Amino acid sequence: MDYQMAVSFLLLVFSLLLSLQLQATAEDVFVGVNIGTDLSVMPHPTQVVALLKAQQIRHVRLYDADGGMLMALANTGIQVMVTVPNEQLLGIGQSNSTAANWVNHNVIAHYPATNITSISVGSEVLTTLPNAAKILVNALKYIHSALVASNLDHQIKVSTPLSSSIILDSFPPSQAFFNASLDSVIVPLLGFLQSTNSFLMLNVYPYYDYMQSDGFILLDYALLKPLPSNKEAVDSNTLLRYTNVFDAMVDAAYFAMASLNFTNIPIIVSETGWPSKGGSNEPDATLENANTYNSNLIRHVLNKTGTPKHPGIAVSTYIYELYNEDLKPGPISEKNWGLFDANGKPIYILHLTGSGLVLANDTANPTYCAAKEGADPKMLQAALDWACGPGRVDCSALLQGQPCYEPDNVMAHATYAFNTYYHQMGKASGSCDFNGVAAVTTTNPSHGSCSFSESVGRNGTMANITAPSMNSTNADSSATAFGYNILSCAVMMVGALLWSSIWL
Protein backbone atom coordinates (compact mmCIF):
# COMPACT_ATOMS: atom_id res chain seq x y z
CA MET A 1 0.00 0.00 0.00
CA ASP A 2 1.48 3.39 -0.96
CA TYR A 3 1.45 6.52 1.17
CA GLN A 4 -1.51 8.08 -0.65
CA MET A 5 -3.65 4.99 -0.05
CA ALA A 6 -2.66 4.98 3.60
CA VAL A 7 -3.68 8.62 3.98
CA SER A 8 -7.01 7.90 2.27
CA PHE A 9 -7.61 5.05 4.67
CA LEU A 10 -6.72 7.33 7.57
CA LEU A 11 -9.31 9.85 6.45
CA LEU A 12 -11.90 7.09 6.15
CA VAL A 13 -11.17 5.88 9.67
CA PHE A 14 -11.47 9.34 11.19
CA SER A 15 -14.71 9.88 9.29
CA LEU A 16 -16.00 6.69 10.90
CA LEU A 17 -14.78 7.87 14.30
CA LEU A 18 -16.53 11.22 13.92
CA SER A 19 -19.74 9.42 13.01
CA LEU A 20 -19.45 7.21 16.08
CA GLN A 21 -18.80 10.20 18.33
CA LEU A 22 -21.83 12.05 17.01
CA GLN A 23 -23.94 8.92 17.46
CA ALA A 24 -22.70 8.51 21.04
CA THR A 25 -23.52 12.17 21.72
CA ALA A 26 -27.07 11.66 20.47
CA GLU A 27 -27.50 8.50 22.53
CA ASP A 28 -26.26 10.21 25.69
CA VAL A 29 -28.97 12.86 25.70
CA PHE A 30 -30.97 12.94 28.92
CA VAL A 31 -33.55 14.81 30.95
CA GLY A 32 -32.62 15.03 34.62
CA VAL A 33 -33.93 16.93 37.62
CA ASN A 34 -32.60 19.40 40.15
CA ILE A 35 -33.19 18.47 43.79
CA GLY A 36 -33.62 21.44 46.12
CA THR A 37 -33.97 21.03 49.87
CA ASP A 38 -35.82 24.18 51.03
CA LEU A 39 -38.78 22.14 52.31
CA SER A 40 -40.29 22.30 55.77
CA VAL A 41 -40.41 18.49 55.69
CA MET A 42 -37.65 17.20 53.45
CA PRO A 43 -38.12 13.53 52.46
CA HIS A 44 -35.46 11.12 53.69
CA PRO A 45 -32.74 10.44 51.11
CA THR A 46 -33.95 6.87 50.65
CA GLN A 47 -37.44 8.20 49.85
CA VAL A 48 -35.97 10.64 47.35
CA VAL A 49 -34.07 7.87 45.61
CA ALA A 50 -37.13 5.61 45.60
CA LEU A 51 -39.06 8.37 43.79
CA LEU A 52 -36.23 8.81 41.29
CA LYS A 53 -36.21 5.10 40.56
CA ALA A 54 -39.99 4.91 40.23
CA GLN A 55 -39.86 7.78 37.73
CA GLN A 56 -36.90 6.32 35.77
CA ILE A 57 -34.88 9.48 36.47
CA ARG A 58 -31.26 8.63 35.72
CA HIS A 59 -29.62 12.07 36.13
CA VAL A 60 -29.83 14.43 39.11
CA ARG A 61 -28.22 17.67 40.12
CA LEU A 62 -27.72 18.38 43.83
CA TYR A 63 -27.22 21.91 45.15
CA ASP A 64 -24.64 20.60 47.61
CA ALA A 65 -22.83 17.34 48.29
CA ASP A 66 -24.93 16.02 51.16
CA GLY A 67 -23.39 12.81 52.48
CA GLY A 68 -26.72 11.14 53.27
CA MET A 69 -28.03 11.81 49.79
CA LEU A 70 -24.84 10.58 48.15
CA MET A 71 -24.95 7.38 50.23
CA ALA A 72 -28.59 6.77 49.24
CA LEU A 73 -27.65 7.21 45.59
CA ALA A 74 -24.86 4.64 45.85
CA ASN A 75 -25.18 1.55 43.65
CA THR A 76 -28.22 2.92 41.82
CA GLY A 77 -26.42 3.87 38.60
CA ILE A 78 -28.05 7.30 38.75
CA GLN A 79 -25.64 9.92 37.39
CA VAL A 80 -25.07 12.67 39.93
CA MET A 81 -23.92 16.27 39.66
CA VAL A 82 -22.71 17.61 43.00
CA THR A 83 -22.28 21.29 43.78
CA VAL A 84 -19.79 23.47 45.59
CA PRO A 85 -22.23 25.86 47.35
CA ASN A 86 -21.69 29.57 46.70
CA GLU A 87 -20.87 30.17 50.35
CA GLN A 88 -17.85 27.84 50.07
CA LEU A 89 -16.60 29.33 46.82
CA LEU A 90 -14.29 32.02 48.20
CA GLY A 91 -12.35 29.54 50.33
CA ILE A 92 -11.94 27.06 47.47
CA GLY A 93 -11.04 29.74 44.94
CA GLN A 94 -8.25 31.00 47.17
CA SER A 95 -6.75 27.69 48.27
CA ASN A 96 -5.73 24.63 46.27
CA SER A 97 -5.61 22.55 49.45
CA THR A 98 -9.14 23.60 50.45
CA ALA A 99 -10.36 22.49 47.02
CA ALA A 100 -8.51 19.18 47.37
CA ASN A 101 -10.07 18.60 50.79
CA TRP A 102 -13.53 19.33 49.38
CA VAL A 103 -13.03 16.82 46.56
CA ASN A 104 -11.65 14.18 48.93
CA HIS A 105 -14.56 14.53 51.35
CA ASN A 106 -17.43 15.01 48.93
CA VAL A 107 -16.40 13.10 45.81
CA ILE A 108 -13.65 10.55 46.34
CA ALA A 109 -15.23 9.31 49.58
CA HIS A 110 -18.35 8.29 47.60
CA TYR A 111 -16.99 7.44 44.15
CA PRO A 112 -17.44 5.08 42.29
CA ALA A 113 -20.31 3.53 44.32
CA THR A 114 -22.12 6.81 43.79
CA ASN A 115 -21.93 7.64 40.10
CA ILE A 116 -20.71 11.23 40.35
CA THR A 117 -20.19 12.48 36.81
CA SER A 118 -19.83 16.24 37.23
CA ILE A 119 -19.18 19.02 39.71
CA SER A 120 -20.96 22.36 39.60
CA VAL A 121 -18.70 25.01 41.10
CA GLY A 122 -21.18 27.50 42.52
CA SER A 123 -24.39 28.55 40.80
CA GLU A 124 -24.99 31.73 38.80
CA VAL A 125 -21.95 33.21 40.53
CA LEU A 126 -21.50 36.06 38.05
CA THR A 127 -24.99 37.43 38.74
CA THR A 128 -25.64 36.44 42.37
CA LEU A 129 -22.15 36.68 43.89
CA PRO A 130 -20.24 39.24 41.79
CA ASN A 131 -17.55 39.67 44.45
CA ALA A 132 -16.50 36.07 43.83
CA ALA A 133 -16.33 36.43 40.05
CA LYS A 134 -12.59 37.08 40.04
CA ILE A 135 -11.81 33.78 41.79
CA LEU A 136 -14.41 31.64 39.97
CA VAL A 137 -12.02 30.28 37.34
CA ASN A 138 -9.40 29.60 40.01
CA ALA A 139 -11.99 27.57 41.93
CA LEU A 140 -12.76 25.55 38.79
CA LYS A 141 -9.08 24.93 38.17
CA TYR A 142 -8.37 23.91 41.77
CA ILE A 143 -11.29 21.45 41.82
CA HIS A 144 -10.14 20.05 38.48
CA SER A 145 -6.55 19.71 39.73
CA ALA A 146 -7.80 17.65 42.66
CA LEU A 147 -9.58 15.34 40.21
CA VAL A 148 -6.42 15.07 38.09
CA ALA A 149 -4.46 14.07 41.18
CA SER A 150 -6.91 11.21 41.72
CA ASN A 151 -7.07 10.24 38.02
CA LEU A 152 -10.76 11.17 37.91
CA ASP A 153 -10.60 14.15 35.56
CA HIS A 154 -11.81 12.10 32.57
CA GLN A 155 -14.72 10.59 34.50
CA ILE A 156 -15.90 13.76 36.26
CA LYS A 157 -16.34 17.09 34.50
CA VAL A 158 -16.15 20.49 36.17
CA SER A 159 -18.25 23.51 35.16
CA THR A 160 -20.39 26.32 36.60
CA PRO A 161 -24.00 27.29 35.78
CA LEU A 162 -24.46 30.68 34.15
CA SER A 163 -27.66 32.69 34.04
CA SER A 164 -28.88 33.35 30.51
CA SER A 165 -29.26 36.99 31.58
CA ILE A 166 -25.53 37.57 30.97
CA ILE A 167 -26.20 37.04 27.26
CA LEU A 168 -27.16 40.40 25.75
CA ASP A 169 -29.11 41.16 22.57
CA SER A 170 -30.23 37.54 22.52
CA PHE A 171 -32.62 37.86 19.59
CA PRO A 172 -31.90 37.30 16.89
CA PRO A 173 -29.55 34.67 18.34
CA SER A 174 -26.87 35.31 15.72
CA GLN A 175 -26.09 38.74 17.17
CA ALA A 176 -25.97 37.64 20.82
CA PHE A 177 -22.92 38.36 22.95
CA PHE A 178 -21.87 38.05 26.57
CA ASN A 179 -21.99 41.12 28.79
CA ALA A 180 -18.64 42.72 27.93
CA SER A 181 -18.05 43.72 31.55
CA LEU A 182 -17.69 40.01 32.29
CA ASP A 183 -15.23 39.19 29.51
CA SER A 184 -12.31 39.05 31.94
CA VAL A 185 -14.03 36.05 33.55
CA ILE A 186 -15.95 34.60 30.60
CA VAL A 187 -12.94 34.23 28.29
CA PRO A 188 -10.74 32.25 30.75
CA LEU A 189 -13.84 30.30 31.83
CA LEU A 190 -14.54 29.19 28.26
CA GLY A 191 -10.84 28.45 27.82
CA PHE A 192 -10.99 26.17 30.85
CA LEU A 193 -14.11 24.37 29.61
CA GLN A 194 -12.55 23.85 26.20
CA SER A 195 -9.21 22.61 27.52
CA THR A 196 -10.89 20.10 29.88
CA ASN A 197 -13.50 18.90 27.34
CA SER A 198 -16.24 20.10 29.66
CA PHE A 199 -19.55 21.80 28.86
CA LEU A 200 -21.15 25.18 29.36
CA MET A 201 -23.94 25.01 31.93
CA LEU A 202 -26.76 27.42 31.17
CA ASN A 203 -29.88 28.22 33.20
CA VAL A 204 -32.72 28.91 30.76
CA TYR A 205 -36.07 30.25 32.00
CA PRO A 206 -38.56 31.04 29.19
CA TYR A 207 -41.09 31.85 31.93
CA TYR A 208 -39.09 34.90 33.01
CA ASP A 209 -38.29 35.87 29.41
CA TYR A 210 -42.02 35.79 28.68
CA MET A 211 -42.97 37.70 31.84
CA GLN A 212 -40.41 40.45 31.15
CA SER A 213 -41.14 40.84 27.43
CA ASP A 214 -44.17 43.16 27.78
CA GLY A 215 -46.15 41.01 25.38
CA PHE A 216 -43.41 40.77 22.76
CA ILE A 217 -43.00 37.02 23.39
CA LEU A 218 -46.08 34.90 22.73
CA LEU A 219 -47.11 32.49 25.48
CA ASP A 220 -47.23 29.57 23.03
CA TYR A 221 -43.68 30.46 21.89
CA ALA A 222 -42.50 30.27 25.51
CA LEU A 223 -44.36 27.00 26.18
CA LEU A 224 -42.80 25.14 23.20
CA LYS A 225 -46.23 24.74 21.62
CA PRO A 226 -46.39 24.08 17.86
CA LEU A 227 -46.65 27.35 15.95
CA PRO A 228 -47.94 28.16 12.47
CA SER A 229 -45.12 29.22 10.17
CA ASN A 230 -46.25 32.86 10.20
CA LYS A 231 -45.77 32.94 13.99
CA GLU A 232 -42.24 31.55 13.96
CA ALA A 233 -39.39 33.94 14.71
CA VAL A 234 -36.82 34.30 11.95
CA ASP A 235 -33.19 35.28 12.51
CA SER A 236 -32.67 37.85 9.76
CA ASN A 237 -28.92 37.21 9.65
CA THR A 238 -29.03 33.42 9.29
CA LEU A 239 -32.65 32.90 8.14
CA LEU A 240 -32.94 30.23 10.83
CA ARG A 241 -36.50 29.80 12.09
CA TYR A 242 -37.24 29.56 15.82
CA THR A 243 -40.40 28.02 17.23
CA ASN A 244 -39.63 28.43 20.95
CA VAL A 245 -37.68 30.52 23.45
CA PHE A 246 -35.70 27.53 24.73
CA ASP A 247 -33.96 26.88 21.40
CA ALA A 248 -33.43 30.58 20.79
CA MET A 249 -31.66 31.04 24.14
CA VAL A 250 -29.47 27.97 23.66
CA ASP A 251 -28.44 29.17 20.19
CA ALA A 252 -27.83 32.66 21.56
CA ALA A 253 -25.29 31.07 23.92
CA TYR A 254 -23.66 29.20 21.03
CA PHE A 255 -23.39 32.43 19.01
CA ALA A 256 -22.12 34.37 22.02
CA MET A 257 -19.35 31.79 22.50
CA ALA A 258 -18.55 31.93 18.78
CA SER A 259 -18.16 35.71 19.00
CA LEU A 260 -15.28 35.01 21.41
CA ASN A 261 -13.87 32.32 19.07
CA PHE A 262 -15.10 29.31 21.06
CA THR A 263 -17.03 27.03 18.74
CA ASN A 264 -16.68 23.52 20.12
CA ILE A 265 -18.03 23.72 23.69
CA PRO A 266 -21.28 21.78 24.13
CA ILE A 267 -24.13 23.18 26.20
CA ILE A 268 -26.10 21.52 28.98
CA VAL A 269 -29.16 23.32 30.33
CA SER A 270 -28.66 23.08 34.07
CA GLU A 271 -32.03 24.58 35.04
CA THR A 272 -35.31 25.15 33.25
CA GLY A 273 -38.97 24.77 34.13
CA TRP A 274 -42.25 26.58 34.72
CA PRO A 275 -44.04 27.38 38.00
CA SER A 276 -47.43 25.75 38.60
CA LYS A 277 -48.77 28.48 40.89
CA GLY A 278 -48.22 32.21 41.32
CA GLY A 279 -49.58 35.35 42.86
CA SER A 280 -52.14 37.71 41.37
CA ASN A 281 -49.39 39.38 39.35
CA GLU A 282 -48.30 36.02 37.87
CA PRO A 283 -51.38 34.88 35.94
CA ASP A 284 -49.49 32.47 33.70
CA ALA A 285 -47.96 30.48 36.55
CA THR A 286 -50.58 27.73 36.31
CA LEU A 287 -50.78 23.96 36.52
CA GLU A 288 -51.70 23.70 32.84
CA ASN A 289 -48.84 25.91 31.66
CA ALA A 290 -46.30 24.13 33.87
CA ASN A 291 -47.54 20.79 32.57
CA THR A 292 -47.43 22.00 28.97
CA TYR A 293 -43.92 23.43 29.22
CA ASN A 294 -42.30 20.48 30.95
CA SER A 295 -44.13 17.89 28.84
CA ASN A 296 -43.15 19.64 25.60
CA LEU A 297 -39.61 20.15 26.90
CA ILE A 298 -39.08 16.47 27.71
CA ARG A 299 -40.35 15.38 24.30
CA HIS A 300 -38.29 18.05 22.56
CA VAL A 301 -35.04 17.07 24.29
CA LEU A 302 -35.46 13.31 24.03
CA ASN A 303 -36.55 13.50 20.37
CA LYS A 304 -33.00 14.76 19.70
CA THR A 305 -34.14 17.47 17.31
CA GLY A 306 -31.44 19.83 18.53
CA THR A 307 -31.63 23.56 17.81
CA PRO A 308 -31.83 25.45 14.51
CA LYS A 309 -28.09 26.25 14.71
CA HIS A 310 -27.18 22.67 15.61
CA PRO A 311 -29.94 20.37 14.34
CA GLY A 312 -29.67 16.80 15.57
CA ILE A 313 -27.35 17.73 18.44
CA ALA A 314 -29.65 17.43 21.42
CA VAL A 315 -29.17 19.54 24.54
CA SER A 316 -29.37 17.51 27.74
CA THR A 317 -31.44 19.31 30.33
CA TYR A 318 -32.17 19.34 34.06
CA ILE A 319 -35.72 20.32 35.02
CA TYR A 320 -36.14 22.69 37.92
CA GLU A 321 -37.19 20.89 40.07
CA LEU A 322 -38.14 17.61 41.76
CA TYR A 323 -40.06 19.01 44.78
CA ASN A 324 -42.00 22.16 45.50
CA GLU A 325 -39.88 24.09 48.02
CA ASP A 326 -42.26 25.76 50.47
CA LEU A 327 -39.44 27.54 52.34
CA LYS A 328 -38.15 29.41 49.30
CA PRO A 329 -38.27 33.19 49.83
CA GLY A 330 -39.84 35.52 47.32
CA PRO A 331 -43.10 35.43 45.34
CA ILE A 332 -45.52 32.49 45.43
CA SER A 333 -44.15 31.15 42.16
CA GLU A 334 -40.72 30.59 43.76
CA LYS A 335 -42.24 27.87 45.93
CA ASN A 336 -44.02 26.08 43.10
CA TRP A 337 -41.59 24.85 40.44
CA GLY A 338 -41.69 21.22 41.60
CA LEU A 339 -42.98 18.14 39.79
CA PHE A 340 -43.92 16.52 43.14
CA ASP A 341 -44.90 17.52 46.65
CA ALA A 342 -42.92 16.40 49.69
CA ASN A 343 -44.94 13.15 49.86
CA GLY A 344 -43.98 12.20 46.32
CA LYS A 345 -47.44 12.99 44.90
CA PRO A 346 -47.36 14.55 41.41
CA ILE A 347 -48.31 18.22 41.27
CA TYR A 348 -49.68 17.41 37.81
CA ILE A 349 -49.57 14.44 35.46
CA LEU A 350 -47.20 15.11 32.57
CA HIS A 351 -48.56 14.69 29.05
CA LEU A 352 -45.99 12.10 28.00
CA THR A 353 -48.00 9.25 26.46
CA GLY A 354 -45.82 7.30 24.06
CA SER A 355 -42.65 9.26 24.82
CA GLY A 356 -40.85 6.69 26.93
CA LEU A 357 -40.44 5.87 30.60
CA VAL A 358 -38.68 8.98 31.88
CA LEU A 359 -40.87 10.97 34.26
CA ALA A 360 -44.01 9.01 33.43
CA ASN A 361 -45.35 10.39 36.69
CA ASP A 362 -48.93 9.13 36.68
CA THR A 363 -48.94 7.80 40.21
CA ALA A 364 -52.55 8.80 40.78
CA ASN A 365 -53.81 5.48 39.36
CA PRO A 366 -51.15 2.90 40.27
CA THR A 367 -51.06 -0.50 38.65
CA TYR A 368 -49.62 -3.72 40.01
CA CYS A 369 -48.52 -7.08 38.67
CA ALA A 370 -50.08 -10.13 40.34
CA ALA A 371 -50.06 -13.89 39.90
CA LYS A 372 -53.16 -15.12 38.08
CA GLU A 373 -55.75 -17.01 40.04
CA GLY A 374 -55.72 -20.69 39.07
CA ALA A 375 -52.23 -20.55 37.53
CA ASP A 376 -50.23 -23.78 37.55
CA PRO A 377 -48.25 -23.81 40.85
CA LYS A 378 -45.23 -25.37 39.14
CA MET A 379 -45.16 -22.60 36.53
CA LEU A 380 -45.59 -20.00 39.28
CA GLN A 381 -42.67 -21.50 41.20
CA ALA A 382 -40.49 -21.49 38.07
CA ALA A 383 -41.37 -17.85 37.38
CA LEU A 384 -40.74 -16.95 41.04
CA ASP A 385 -37.34 -18.62 40.91
CA TRP A 386 -36.48 -16.70 37.75
CA ALA A 387 -37.60 -13.35 39.18
CA CYS A 388 -35.55 -13.83 42.36
CA GLY A 389 -32.56 -15.06 40.32
CA PRO A 390 -31.85 -13.84 36.79
CA GLY A 391 -34.60 -11.21 37.11
CA ARG A 392 -32.56 -9.52 39.88
CA VAL A 393 -35.49 -8.97 42.23
CA ASP A 394 -34.54 -8.54 45.89
CA CYS A 395 -36.70 -11.25 47.46
CA SER A 396 -35.31 -10.90 50.98
CA ALA A 397 -38.70 -9.61 52.18
CA LEU A 398 -40.06 -13.14 51.50
CA LEU A 399 -37.75 -14.80 54.02
CA GLN A 400 -39.18 -16.16 57.23
CA GLY A 401 -39.68 -13.39 59.77
CA GLN A 402 -39.81 -10.69 57.11
CA PRO A 403 -42.98 -8.65 56.37
CA CYS A 404 -43.94 -10.44 53.15
CA TYR A 405 -43.28 -14.04 54.28
CA GLU A 406 -46.91 -14.60 55.28
CA PRO A 407 -48.94 -16.11 53.74
CA ASP A 408 -46.28 -18.69 52.98
CA ASN A 409 -47.54 -19.87 49.60
CA VAL A 410 -46.32 -19.63 46.04
CA MET A 411 -49.20 -17.40 44.90
CA ALA A 412 -48.45 -14.64 47.43
CA HIS A 413 -44.66 -14.88 47.06
CA ALA A 414 -44.89 -14.87 43.25
CA THR A 415 -47.12 -11.79 43.31
CA TYR A 416 -44.54 -9.95 45.41
CA ALA A 417 -41.70 -10.89 43.05
CA PHE A 418 -43.72 -10.24 39.89
CA ASN A 419 -44.85 -6.82 41.08
CA THR A 420 -41.34 -5.78 42.08
CA TYR A 421 -39.94 -6.84 38.71
CA TYR A 422 -42.78 -5.04 36.90
CA HIS A 423 -41.89 -1.76 38.61
CA GLN A 424 -38.16 -2.35 38.17
CA MET A 425 -38.82 -2.40 34.46
CA GLY A 426 -40.84 0.81 34.60
CA LYS A 427 -44.10 -1.05 33.89
CA ALA A 428 -42.80 -1.75 30.40
CA SER A 429 -44.98 -3.72 28.02
CA GLY A 430 -44.47 -7.46 28.53
CA SER A 431 -42.86 -7.10 31.95
CA CYS A 432 -45.94 -8.57 33.66
CA ASP A 433 -46.52 -11.86 31.86
CA PHE A 434 -44.13 -14.52 33.15
CA ASN A 435 -45.20 -17.09 30.56
CA GLY A 436 -48.85 -16.32 31.09
CA VAL A 437 -49.06 -16.73 34.87
CA ALA A 438 -49.19 -12.99 35.73
CA ALA A 439 -51.36 -10.02 34.79
CA VAL A 440 -51.60 -6.27 35.45
CA THR A 441 -54.21 -5.22 37.99
CA THR A 442 -55.35 -2.00 39.65
CA THR A 443 -56.11 -3.91 42.86
CA ASN A 444 -53.44 -3.30 45.49
CA PRO A 445 -52.14 -6.74 46.62
CA SER A 446 -50.96 -5.36 49.99
CA HIS A 447 -51.73 -7.57 52.96
CA GLY A 448 -50.86 -7.36 56.63
CA SER A 449 -47.42 -5.87 57.10
CA CYS A 450 -46.52 -6.41 53.44
CA SER A 451 -47.19 -3.10 51.71
CA PHE A 452 -47.25 -2.88 47.92
CA SER A 453 -46.87 0.84 47.22
CA GLU A 454 -45.39 1.47 43.78
CA SER A 455 -42.56 -0.99 44.28
CA VAL A 456 -41.99 -2.93 47.44
CA GLY A 457 -38.75 -3.31 49.33
CA ARG A 458 -37.51 -4.54 52.67
CA ASN A 459 -39.96 -3.75 55.51
CA GLY A 460 -42.58 -2.65 53.02
CA THR A 461 -40.73 0.52 51.99
CA MET A 462 -40.12 1.64 48.44
CA ALA A 463 -37.15 -0.24 47.11
CA ASN A 464 -33.87 1.11 45.76
CA ILE A 465 -33.64 -1.20 42.78
CA THR A 466 -31.13 -0.99 39.96
CA ALA A 467 -32.79 -2.53 36.94
CA PRO A 468 -31.97 -2.84 33.24
CA SER A 469 -33.45 0.10 31.35
CA MET A 470 -33.36 1.61 27.90
CA ASN A 471 -32.00 4.72 29.59
CA SER A 472 -29.45 2.90 31.74
CA THR A 473 -25.97 4.22 32.16
CA ASN A 474 -24.68 0.74 31.38
CA ALA A 475 -25.95 1.08 27.85
CA ASP A 476 -24.35 4.51 27.56
CA SER A 477 -21.06 3.17 28.84
CA SER A 478 -21.14 0.29 26.40
CA ALA A 479 -21.71 2.62 23.48
CA THR A 480 -18.87 4.84 24.62
CA ALA A 481 -16.56 1.87 25.15
CA PHE A 482 -17.44 0.59 21.68
CA GLY A 483 -16.47 3.94 20.20
CA TYR A 484 -13.16 3.95 22.05
CA ASN A 485 -12.44 0.35 21.03
CA ILE A 486 -13.08 1.26 17.40
CA LEU A 487 -10.74 4.21 17.78
CA SER A 488 -7.98 2.11 19.33
CA CYS A 489 -8.21 -0.52 16.63
CA ALA A 490 -8.36 2.11 13.90
CA VAL A 491 -5.30 3.95 15.22
CA MET A 492 -3.31 0.72 15.42
CA MET A 493 -4.36 -0.28 11.90
CA VAL A 494 -3.52 3.13 10.47
CA GLY A 495 -0.20 3.16 12.28
CA ALA A 496 0.69 -0.23 10.87
CA LEU A 497 -0.34 0.79 7.37
CA LEU A 498 1.60 4.05 7.50
CA TRP A 499 4.63 2.22 8.88
CA SER A 500 4.36 -0.30 6.06
CA SER A 501 4.00 2.44 3.45
CA ILE A 502 7.33 3.92 4.51
CA TRP A 503 9.15 0.67 3.84
CA LEU A 504 7.28 -0.53 0.75
Image (tube, rainbow, N blue to C red):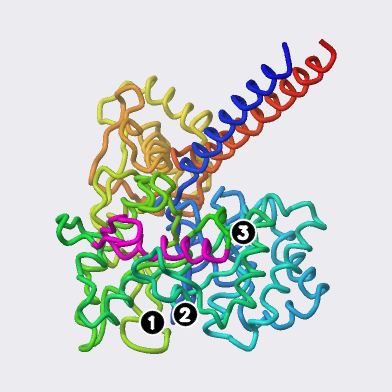
**17 lies left or right of 153:** left
The residue tagged 1 is: 326
Mark 3 Cα within 10 Å, few/some/many (few <14, many 20+)? many
Q: Which residues are magenta?
A: 233-260
Separation (CA) of disc 1 from disc 2:
7 Å
Q: Earlier in the sequence, mark 3 or mark 1?
A: 3
> In the picture provided, is 129 more to the left or to the right than 59?
right
497 in relation to 488, above or below: above
Tell me the quadrant of the picture where the N terminus can be found: top right
- Residue depth check, mark 3 versus mark 1: number of the one nearer the observer: 3
Judging by the rendered image, the residue that carries numbered circle 2 is 38
Q: Residue 292, image x and y in percent? A: 23, 62
Question: What residue is shown at x 42% (from left), y 62% (from top)?
Answer: 250
Residue at the (27%, 54%) spot, across then down: 362
In magenta stretch: residue 257: yes
Kind of residue at disc 1: Asp
